[in-house]
Image: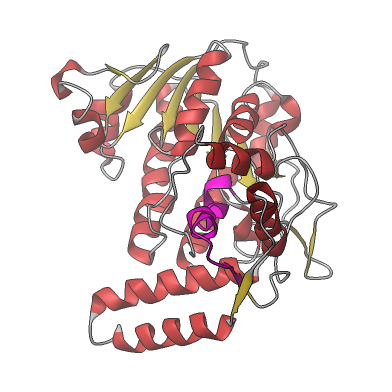
Amino acid sequence: IVRGTEKTTQPSPAAATASAGMPKADARQRVCVLGATGTIGRATVAALVQRGHDVVCFVRPRTGAQRGNPSTGCLPLLDGAAVKQVDMTDKASIVRDGFGGETFDAIVSCMASRTGAPKDAWAIDHRAHLNVLELASRFGVSHFVLLSAICVQKPLLAFQHAKLAFEGALIDSGLRYSIVRPTAFFKSLSGQIERVQRGRPFLLFGDGTLTSCKPISDSDLADYIAGCLTDEDRWNRILPIGGPGSAITPRDQGEAMFALLGRPPKFRSVPVALLDGIAGALGLLGHIVPRLAEKAELARIGRYYATESMLVLDPKTGRYDAAATPSTGTETLLDFYRSVLSGTATPERGAHAVF
């Protein structure tokens, strides 16, 4: 899906022409990773290293500075990987501090805006990625693997339009590409664990069956992303992907939590109209106080996730299709909940969490 219209997962003419003359991907490649400090990014770096790739991560200067002396160039991130401090919004920094005369076989991007607010989304999800794409060929890159999001199928929000705009630019670039669109992340569905542990009811929008998803773990998604470098079936394609098992609803998630705690389910319904009212009020106030406009967008993001399923959207029927949503991996959301409740895992929630 590109710019809101259906586009097949077959290669674009430019990409097909370019890939026709490309040799097969080597087992070991030199890979530049963007967004390596996020939860998915860290897991992806680990998966790439485990597969034997030579990995160099471009991270924000502030992040790199916390790891050592910025003047040292490459700093340790993980065993077998290195990090360079790069301002991804500055093409000069990307050349000077990132590529620095080196060559890479591939770029793997897990980079994303932190909030999804319009200014941040267009600066990171679109412009920063374009900066790298425009320089990629100069530094030997032949393959660009992009972590996108399945919600761009139905773009109603600024960050979705920004992601789609870059997807389109990547497809038209002539580089070999793999665009990975995952469904829900485990961390996004973990916000009510502590609430339920304290004996409070699990909050639902409507009756809790408005939406469903096939959540995927960080490690399973990372392994799938890393596999894009060498699996030709994932080249020049848009790749929706979910985790193992059947699609689950928010009510299913709540029932699973209560079952693991050995307690009877207790739910409380929240009307979707509440988010509409919050977004509307903040939107109006945003004309007077600009910072409230950003909060209005965050409320709209919350409403979107409360009312739209994270599954493949059938463009003919306009319905989400669980059967058409591919699955991968072995870890289920129930496994993750069990780990969190036992204290062996701690979810790192992002800025898009609704609860």
Q: Is residue 41 above or below residue 171?
A: above
Which colour scheme appears in the figure?
Answer: secondary structure
Rendered residue at 45%/20% (across/down): 104
Q: Is residue 226 above or below residue 293?
A: above
Magenta-tinted stretch: 185-204
Q: Is residue 174 above or below residue 212?
A: above
Residue 107 seen by the camera: no
Residue 131 seen by the camera: yes
- Residue 38 percent coordinates (x, y): 41, 38
The question of residue 81 being in magenta is answered with no
Position of 289 compared to 270: left or right? left
Q: Nearer the viewer, residue 330 or 91?
A: 330
Position of 86 compared to 264: left or right? left
- Residue 84 percent coordinates (x, y): 28, 25
Rendered residue at 47%/59% (across/down): 353
Query: Can you say which quadrant of the picture contains the N terminus?
Result: bottom right
- Residue 227 percent coordinates (x, y): 65, 25
Q: Nearer the viewer, residue 149 or 188?
A: 188
Classify residue 221 by image quadrant. top right
Position of 251 compared to 302: left or right? right
Classify residue 265 by image quadrant. bottom right
Classify residue 348 by image quadrant. top left
Q: How many marks?
A: 0
- Residue 224 percent coordinates (x, y): 65, 31
The question of residue 190 being in magenta is answered with yes
Position of 237 compared to 326: left or right? left
